[in-house]
Image (cartoon, rainbow, N blue to C red):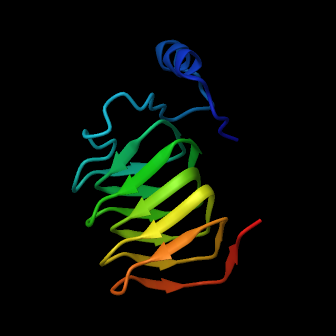
Amino acid sequence: MIEALSEPEAAAAAETGRSDLQHVVAGRYPLVPLVPADGVFEGQIAILGETRIEGTVRGTVRGSGRLELGPDGRIEGIVECDEVWSHGTIVGPVTALCRVHLCSGALMDGDLDTPRVEVSDSAIWNGVARVGH
């Protein structure tokens, strides 16, 4: 299971090559995508701070912070973050502690659990929602 780490813990984990984490992001460079366009990452991702994904992730994305999925981005798996802003495709359940925003052109195929959700007019979402707590 991926655990949320503080920034010093994330840096230490990245330096020591902890075997239970396939990738750790400290959130220092939100404009640089973790997975670039046309890139594919398979495994678990622990995020901290603001994290951007432009390519494809096949696996779990968890952590504290804001996840932003670009227009060509795709996540196939579980997403558990503080906040999710999607312009791309998510196939799997999403849990957000603060909110989920499905922007124009977004596609989500999965259940949603969050206190607040915003769905743009041209976004498509198939699933069951649990909104508010």
Of residues 103 and 51, the one nearer the viewer is 103
Q: Quadrant of residue 74?
A: bottom left
Look at the image and tell me in which quarter the C terminus lies: bottom right
Residue 122 image point, x, y percent: 33, 86
Residue 29 appears in view:
yes
Residue 132 versus residue 52: which sits nearer the camera?
Answer: 132
Expressed as whole percent of the image width and height from the top left, the position of residue 75 reads 44, 62
Q: Say left or right for 26 vs 18.
A: left
Q: Position of residue 7 (x, y in %)?
A: 53, 21
Callout count: 0
The quarter of the image holding the N terminus is top right
| Residue beneath the point at 41% across and 32% down | 27
**Residue 60 at least partly seen:** no
What residue occupies the far right of the structure in this picture? 133
Q: Quadrant of residue 112?
A: bottom right
Q: Is residue 124 above or below residue 14?
A: below
Q: Is residue 103 left or right of residue 115?
A: left
Q: In the picture shown, does residue 37 fall above or below 89?
A: above
Q: Residue at x 32, y 62 (%)?
A: 73
Q: Residue furthest left?
A: 37
Residue at left 52%, top 64%? 100
Q: Position of residue 66 (x, y in %)?
A: 47, 47
- The residue sitting at 60% across, 26% down in the picture is 19
The answer to whether residue 10 is left or right of residue 50 is right
